[in-house]
Image (cartoon, helix red, strand yellow):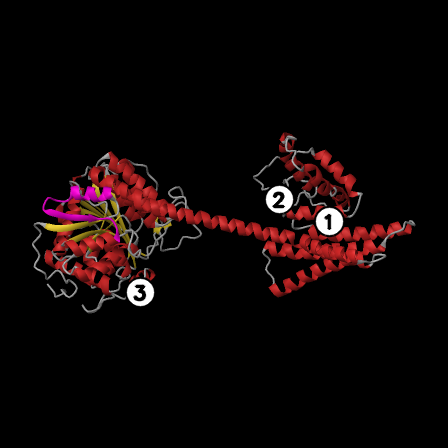
């Protein structure tokens, strides 16, 4: 049972109506009628108000319609339970009139509880005075304790609201005040019986039971909250343990199998490509925790390179061995001034140039390609080494912009350097991108979407 | 070639060359074992297979293979995996060398087996030819570094931050030459290519790599011991 967002006062009646399927109007009517029977109802309404959680904003934006939908099918034990909370909607109306209505408050249920209870206490005192003026026989033995109890409950509630809202105070002071409130409630209930006409053993027993009940009512919301917090935490821990189990199992079995497939199928086959993609996804999930991998833009240079490697591997028969060394370096966005980007961050154009180099290697060489990133005091050094046929820069026609523009030009504009040279032992190609440490050159990289060919 | 044989207890042993190299495959997945067995070069004799720590210990002591291709994660024993196999078996199989194979890229996994005494580390995605080559290299007393392990070494020894060892005795830092070699291996160069690029003999590259392996095993550098302590290796 939850209280809807859209509410007249506390939403207790609406929540109750939705929960049980009884029409809202009926609940309200019964509540009003029963509220005249005794003062007991007011307390219970307040209690329900604070104990029943507020429905989430997303839970049901249109409680009215859901009320209409909710059928009367749930006939369970509605009737007997209904009486008590229903008795309270009357006070809802009363409070509404006395200016305590907080129907549209966003802060939910914690805010007005204290005021309401104090208001009820005042209301009780006021009506007692008026009634006695009118000549009615007012049992002071009942009214005075009732006022004390309400005041005590209000005080207790103030503390609980503080606890829950996280406004941490000195715990000893808090404890003293809670105890004071509880004592106040207990004394009030005791007064009912002690000031009674002819005390006997039964009234004493009843008094003791009432005190216990009173304390229970006052602390119930707090205990309930504590208990639900505990349950939440336990569930979270169980989920985490289960996830670790699955991760261990996947690591042992599925990763092995994927590695085997790649090994058997050879680096150029589709099977190996698929297995590699799956392996990468699984690794991401296993080793980066519950973070949803791959969707958010990588802000770490190493992560960005791995992501690019993954993307290219999906389309080409190539395997990138990405090795990163040194402190993590972020990626400075060229789009605009990022609040959290420091001057040590790599410009986006470095990433773009690296991507182009890797794409070239995938396209023209394939097989195993090494990507090595070193970030240190000297700056950033990134090399892409393939074992393909190799090429010479001066053999590329002038109009081919791939290497010349998107790698060499880009790095130059970013304040760095790019070199294309034959790979180790004269085979293949090695593209070396360097960016000296304190480069503050503005990244004026126009984002061309050229197709790179060489 | 400098004298670094103190750590290569088996390297001084007159091995039966690389021909007829006797290996044992230890992995808890039978598919992987049979797959690897089929892929290995013809001149490598597979003596047997083992799937758990206890099985591996028994086989290693019983068969005395030259090289054990050892998975890092293994069930059984005291939960120590491949590292436990190395530590337990090494005293009773003095001429056996261990080459770690793993799907894991995690630094602590790699470091645990290396510090336990493995002579090298390669990933399981390596081809049969690559594994064969690595096994042969290990059998000849050399260390085998994957690019990733080289990258890790550069990181862990602070070589990227510019720390350089002053003397050859220093265990906690790499010398300038070792740093260069590691950097090229991390770039995917083979030993021969490293030698060609640095204009040094291939044997010298192997010396440097072995020296780095020794440092990796013996260094008390914080970054290394942190993992070792975490895994209760020290």
Near mark 3 (Cα within 10 A), the count class, few <14, some 14-19 or many ≥20, is few
State left or right for residue A69 relative to residue B155.
right
Numbered range of the magenta stretch: B30-53
Which circle, 3 or 1, is nearer the viewer?
1
Distance of mark 2 from mark 3, alpha carbons?
A: 52 Å
Above or below B132: residue A22:
above
State which quarter of the image contains the N terminus of chain A: top right
Q: Chain of mark 2?
A: A
**Both marks 2 and 1 on one chain:** yes
Q: Residue at x 31, y 46 (%)?
A: A252
Q: Is residue A360 magenta?
A: no
The residue where tag 2 is placed is A54
For residue A357, side relative to residue B138 (left or right): right
Numbered disc 1: secondary structure: helix
Identify the residue position indicated by label 1 in the image: A43
- Estimate the x, y position of residue B45 in percent, counting from the top left: 12, 47
In space, the residues marked 2 and 1 are separated at their CA atoms by: 19 Å
Callout 2 touching callout 3 (CB < 8 Å): no
- In primary-sequence order, the first of circles 2 and 1 is 1
Q: Which residue bears the numbered disc 3? A: B222
Is residue A338 among what the camera can see?
A: yes
From the top left corner, tell me how far across and down residue A7 is, in percent: 67, 40
Work out whether disc 2 and disc 3 sit on a shared chain.
no
Closer to the camera, A189 or B135? A189
């Amino acid at each position: 049972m939850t209280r809807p967002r859209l509410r007249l006062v506390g939403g207790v009646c609406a929540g109750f109506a939705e929960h049980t399927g009884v029409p809202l109007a009926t609940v309200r009517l019964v509540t009003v009628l029963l509220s005249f029977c005794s003062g007991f109802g007011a307390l219970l309404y307040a209690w329900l108000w604070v104990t029943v959680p507020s429905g989430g904003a997303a839970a049901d934006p249109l409680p009215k319609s859901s009320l209409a939908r909710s059928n009367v099918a749930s006939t369970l034990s509605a009737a007997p339970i209904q009486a008590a909370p229903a008795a309270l909607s009357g006070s809802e109306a009363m409070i509404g009139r006395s200016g305590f209505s907080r129907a549209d408050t966003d802060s939910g249920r914690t805010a007005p509880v204290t005021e309401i209870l104090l208001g009820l206490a005042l209301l009780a005192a006021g009506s007692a005075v008026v009634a006695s003026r009118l000549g009615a026989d007012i049992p002071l033995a009942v009214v005075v304790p009732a006022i004390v109890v309400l005041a005590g409950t209000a005080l207790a509630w103030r503390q609980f609201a503080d606890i829950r809202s996280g406004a941490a105070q000195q715990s000893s002071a808090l404890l003293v005040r809670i105890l004071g409130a509880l004592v106040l409630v207990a004394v009030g209930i005791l007064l009912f019986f002690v000031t009674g006409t002819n005390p006997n053993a039964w009234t004493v027993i009843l008094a003791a039971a009432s005190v216990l009940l009173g304390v229970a009512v006052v602390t119930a919301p707090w205990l309930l909250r504590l208990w639900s917090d505990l349950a939440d935490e336990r569930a979270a821990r169980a989920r985490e343990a289960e996830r670790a189990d699955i991760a261990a199992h996947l690591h042992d079995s599925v990763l092995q199998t994927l590695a085997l497939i790649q090994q058997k199928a050879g680096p150029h086959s589709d099977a190996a490509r698929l297995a590699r993609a799956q392996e990468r996804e699984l690794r991401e999930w296993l080793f980066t925790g519950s973070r949803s991998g791959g969707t958010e833009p990588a802000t770490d240079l190493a992560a960005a390179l791995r992501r690019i490697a993954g993307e290219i591997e999906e389309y080409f028969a190539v395997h990138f061995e990405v090795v990163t060394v040194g402190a993590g370096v972020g990626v400075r966005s060229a789009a605009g001034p990022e609040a959290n980007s420091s001057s040590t961050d790599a410009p986006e154009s470095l990433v773009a140039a690296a991507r182009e180099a890797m794409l070239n290697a995938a396209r023209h060489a394939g097989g195993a390609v090494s990507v090595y990133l070193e970030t240190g005091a000297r700056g950033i050094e990134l090399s892409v080494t393939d074992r393909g046929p190799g090429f010479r820069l001066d053999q590329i026609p002038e109009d081919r912009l791939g290497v010349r523009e998107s790698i060499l030009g880009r790095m130059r504009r970013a304040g760095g350097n790019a070199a294309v040279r034959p790979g180790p032992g004269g085979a293949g190609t090695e593209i070396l991108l360097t960016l000296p440490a304190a480069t503050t050159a503005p990244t004026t990289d126009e984002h061309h979407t050229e197709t790179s060919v060489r | 070639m400098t004298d670094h044989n103190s750590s290569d207890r088996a390297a001084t042993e007159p091995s039966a060359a690389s021909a007829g190299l006797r290996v044992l495959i230890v992995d808890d997945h039978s598919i992987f074992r049979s797959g690897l067995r089929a892929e290995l070069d013809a001149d490598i004799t597979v003596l047997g297979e083992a799937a758990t720590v206890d099985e591996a210990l028994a086989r290693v002591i019983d068969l005395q293979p030259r090289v054990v291709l050892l998975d890092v994660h293994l069930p059984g024993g005291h939960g120590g995996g491949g590292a436990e196999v190395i530590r337990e078996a090494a005293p009773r199989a003095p001429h056996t060398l261990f080459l770690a194979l793993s799907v894991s890229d995690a630094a602590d996994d790699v470091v645990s087996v290396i510090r336990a005494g493995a002579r090298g580390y390669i990933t399981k995605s390596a081809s049969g030819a690559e594994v064969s080559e690595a096994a042969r290299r290990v059998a000849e007393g050399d260390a085998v570094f994957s690019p990733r392990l080289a990258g890790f070494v550069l990181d862990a020894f602070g070589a990227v931050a510019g720390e350089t060892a002053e003397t050859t005795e220093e265990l906690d830092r790499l010398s300038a030459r070792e740093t260069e070699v590691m950097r090229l291996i991390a770039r995917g160069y083979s030993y021969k290519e490293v030698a060609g690029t640095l204009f040094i003999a291939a044997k010298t590259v192997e010396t440097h790599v072995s020296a780095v392996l020794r440092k990796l095993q013996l260094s008390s550098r914080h970054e290394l011991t942190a993992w070792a302590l975490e895994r209760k290796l020290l």
